[in-house]
Image (cartoon, grey):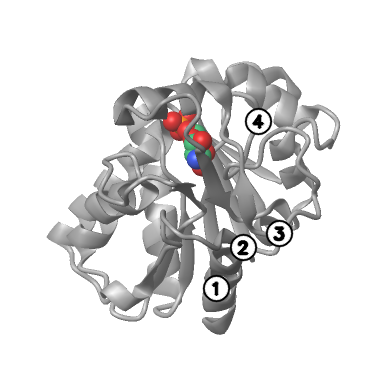
Amino acid sequence: MKITIEKDEHAFDVAAAWRIIGQMLKKPEAVIGLSTGQTTGGMHEVVSQIYKSYPFDVSKVTVFNVDELTNLDRSYSGSCYTMIYEQLVRNLRIPEENFIMPPTLSDDFERECEIFESKLEARGGVDLQMLGIGFNGHIGINQPGTPFESTTWVSPMDPIFEARVRKETGVGPDYPLGGLTRGIKNIMHTRHLILVAKGEHKADIIEEALFGPVTTDMPASVVQLHPHCEVLLDAAAASKILNRI
Ligand code: GLP
């Protein structure tokens, strides 16, 4: 596990953006997994700005997001499809067929999980996954307790995120919400993993995930076992680990 610490949020966004662009340049037919949330919006913006100034060939690049909300319309501004489309896919004009996302609405999500995985498999598997971390250590939407053997499935959301989605969409407490997420096993099968975190509010969870025991109670701790994992942090997110590296 290689740990990179950038001096501030902007330097973090730029470094992360270059990891994404670097993968696209190195392998024009690369399959790249993205992650939504406050951590990744800035890096997607930098990728878009660099592309606008110095366009490069993305006609064969495949992108997808590691997870997606279920039972809400895709047009909801918080759907992963819409976020990734607006933050990156639209700006780089990535061909529609190369933006692979499960639907948000379906009467057979088990099947949708299989289809999602088989599409990624058909393109040779995933080269790079940019992976956010939740306040409770979740990766994708795999909450604490998820087995490391889990494969793409529909998981409950964490309660704080779920409350925000319910508020934003106005759906009642009994309406079933969840998230289709690549399982921990699928994430671990990615060739190159980059765990990203910024901000002081992530400092404790980063310390626990990287230096605590590898346990399903802390899903992100599994990255300690990945043979090609980089952890990319800003100084604030790294503030609790400085004496351990
Ligand atoms: C959501 C996403 C995760 C992401 C996490 C972190 O739960 N489904 O994939 O890693 O948020 O979000 P943030 O970057 O806003 O802290």
Q: Are marks 2 and 4 in contact (CB under 8 Å)?
A: no
Image height of 241 relative to 226, above or below: above
CA gap, disc 3 and disc 2: 11 Å
The kind of secondary structure element at disc 4 is: loop
Disc 4: CA contacts within 10 A as few (<14), some (14-19) or many (>=20): many
Specify which label sits upstream in the sequence, 3 or 1: 1
Specify which label sits upstream in the sequence, 2 or 4: 2
The kind of secondary structure element at disc 2 is: helix
Q: Is mark 2 within 8 Å of ligand 1?
A: no
Mark 4: which amino acid?
Gly
Specify which label sits upstream in the sequence, 2 or 1: 2
The kind of secondary structure element at disc 3 is: loop
Specify which label sits upstream in the sequence, 1 or 4: 1
Question: Residue at left 72%, top 31%?
Answer: 209
Image height of 87 relative to 185, above or below: above
Taking the image as drawn, is residue 8 in sight?
Answer: no
Question: Residue at left 42%, top 34%?
Answer: 39
Specify which label sits upstream in the sequence, 3 or 2: 2
Could you tell me residue 223's position as x and y percent? 72, 45
Residue 37 or residue 67, whichever sits in front: 67
Disc 3: CA contacts within 10 A as few (<14), some (14-19) or many (>=20): some
Could you tell me residue 69's position as x and y percent? 45, 45
Mark 3: which amino acid?
Thr
Q: Nearer the viewer, mark 3 or mark 2?
A: 2
Question: Residue at left 55%, top 73%?
Answer: 115
Residue 137 disc label: 4
Residue 222 disc label: none
Could you tell me residue 2's position as x and y percent? 66, 45
- Report the residue marked by disc 3: 151
